[in-house]
Amino acid sequence: MIEIPATIKDVAKYAGLSIATVSKYLNGGNVLEENRKKIEEAIRVLNFRVNELARGLKTNRTMTVGVLIPSLENIFFTSIISKIENILLQHGYSTIVCNYRESSKLEKIKLEFLVNKMVDGIIMVPHGEEVSHIQELRNKNIPVLLIDRMLKDVECDVVMSDNLNAAYNAVEQLIVRGHRRIGIIGGPEKVYTTQERIKGYIRVHEDYALDIDEDLIKYGGYDIESGYRILEEFMEMANPPTGIFVTNYEMTLGAIMAINKNNIKMPDQISLIGFDNIQLAKVVKPSLSIVVQPMDEIGETAAAILLSRLNGDYGTFPSINRLKTELLIRDSVKALAR
Amino acid sequence: MIEIPATIKDVAKYAGLSIATVSKYLNGGNVLEENRKKIEEAIRVLNFRVNELARGLKTNRTMTVGVLIPSLENIFFTSIISKIENILLQHGYSTIVCNYRESSKLEKIKLEFLVNKMVDGIIMVPHGEEVSHIQELRNKNIPVLLIDRMLKDVECDVVMSDNLNAAYNAVEQLIVRGHRRIGIIGGPEKVYTTQERIKGYIRVHEDYALDIDEDLIKYGGYDIESGYRILEEFMEMANPPTGIFVTNYEMTLGAIMAINKNNIKMPDQISLIGFDNIQLAKVVKPSLSIVVQPMDEIGETAAAILLSRLNGDYGTFPSINRLKTELLIRDSVKALAR
DNA sequence: AATATAAGGTTAAACGTTTCGCGATAGGAG
DNA sequence: CTCCTATCGCGAAACGTTTAACCTTATATT
């Protein structure tokens, strides 16, 4: 037997009050104790719940935030989202999660979708360097916050890791252990995080007055395959590096597969520092050195900033947050004899 | 400069037509070629888009499907969702993804949220055995489809792996390689998938006329810690198993950590068959044997069934789908000498 | 006693759509 | 020439809320 949902009208009739009074109650206004009881009983009996569609139509707010990420299969993003969702819920906001499968075209489609769903704000990881679709959100007065990547051509709140110093510190640990030929496996050349991580690599070389061999800087696709391939390329060089820094999780996975497959001895033949996934680090043998990004902190910061924007507080706009990463050096890194 | 969104009224005025005609156009009705052009121009110039809130209020459909899973940090679920989202989008439906962080309480809250958001249908992974909140959806005439787990007390479409035979086949491979003491690390005792996998374990023992040692059947929490702990428990037994079957990804991870930590030789001291994550299988050394669930197929099947329900087609209701898993035997399993 | 104030209730318009029922026009059939 | 039918446009009601403006009543103030 299908139940037909009760409306505020039904509640009003049942309680013997006007619609306006019920509405006032629903929105936290003052009603007589006596009437409050009547209304609450009516709601309970009729199993009434507010029609959010109608409410949103009137108020122009949906109490919903859109979250848009490149991939749902990337635990770095999903654990940030999980945190965000949790915090927003505590403040009465709910979250619509979308992914654009690493496609710029889909990115725009999903963004349109979120706008059509009338979200009150958006948290996203932008794909390319293009900015027009984000600018459009700003024109529509929808607060946007970027995660993980900064964009040059638009003013926006951002929360990300301090990728430059993350790379600096990781490579530095190889340097102080006597490594002089250090390879870096970067992501796509145009992606912001790649550029930052390469900058860190270069800067630490300069600070230690070491020459840079351009052949030791390689760009991958942030995917497993490129980690695998580039590691093999490095090891096939006439003069291979003694240490390698891999700049994301998927490529780290690929690199380790290549090491296992080719029976390369780690850390004797090669020292490796990977990225992001602390569980992987423990599962690999010898235990893997990694850079860990503060996912929870990223989520918390992002949620807090967006909430303040939703409350109309633009005091600190635009707020640029570079959060510190953690560096764990384990058995996959070896000190070289001089 | 903030733009104020155009309404259908503005479009009608600009095009010199009535609201009703514009609405007809928007919903695929016939309008004169001449008027169609006018409307299209008006829409373009005014940058009009339908207010989905208002539309939903009228039509009682939001063209939105809710997806509810236990955790966003579990790649098994998120990759199924990614597939589902993609297919639904092609049919004009969009997806609201929620997770309930393994909490029955949160599960109900999120379900409420989805209902409040007036989703047209729901795909979910249920948490416990309780059924009332799901029954309520049925009363509200909202199609529900369960993934991964079946519930006894409610008629529902289900899509899941054939967990029983997955376990049967995995354990059988250990048996035919001469293993006689085989441990199984199951999930929580009350969870459907655990029960099925244990059933498979028992049935294959019966079919090969092998005695079952109750001590070799252990229940964990489907988390890393229990995989780690139970593996150690097994190895500390006076008469430890020679082969172990681990029944989900996280516990597989934990088990491998324990093996690495305790310097246990795999496969010489212990043969291991894990679960779910094919990438992990390649990264671990020696290469890991695993059961792989057909995530894409689960997503496709789920989306297809829900779509037919949304179109009012209940011809096959309830549709119970047990999809076959794949078994990969690699170097982590050793044949015992007799 | 007259008046001001506060508290709480009500009426009615509005939000942006869809859709029913009707009217107008034009072409074809007889 | 008349009538029928097909096609398309229009007016207006309805969906379930919120909210501004106003009304009523009771109490406090002078």
Image: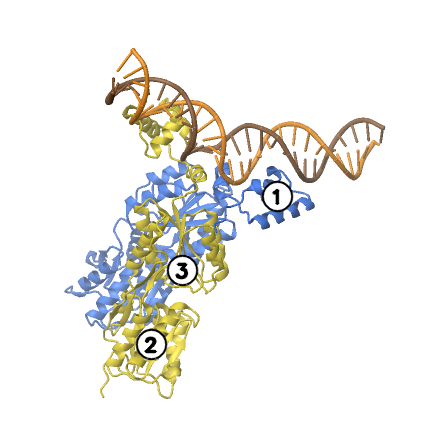
Chain colours: A yellow, B blue, C orange, D brown
| Residue A221, image quadrant | bottom left
Q: Residue B146 or B105: which is nearer the viewer?
A: B105
What amino acid is found at the position of numbered circle 1 in the picture?
A: Tyr
Q: From where the camera sits, is residue B136 visible?
A: yes
Left of A161 or right of it: where is B37?
right
- Which chain contains the residue that carries disc 1? B
Q: Which residue is mark 1?
A: B14
* Residue B216 falls in image quadrant: bottom left
Check disc 3 and give the amino acid type: Val
Instruction: Name the side, left or right, on which B154 lies relative to D15.
Output: left
In the image, residue A237 lies at what x, y percent? 38, 85
Tag 3's secondary structure?
Answer: loop
- The location of residue B115, given as percent across then percent down, is 39, 41
* Residue A47 x, y percent position in the rendering: 36, 31
Can you tell which mark lies on residue A122?
none
Residue drawn at x 69%, y 46% is B33
Question: Residue A229, percent across and down?
Answer: 40, 76
In the picture of the structure, the residue carrying the numbered disc 2 is: A201
| Above or below for B212 versus A197 | above
Q: Quadrant of the N terminus of chain A?
A: top left
Residue A125 tag number: 3
Q: Residues within 10 Å of mark 2 (few under 14, many from 20)?
A: many
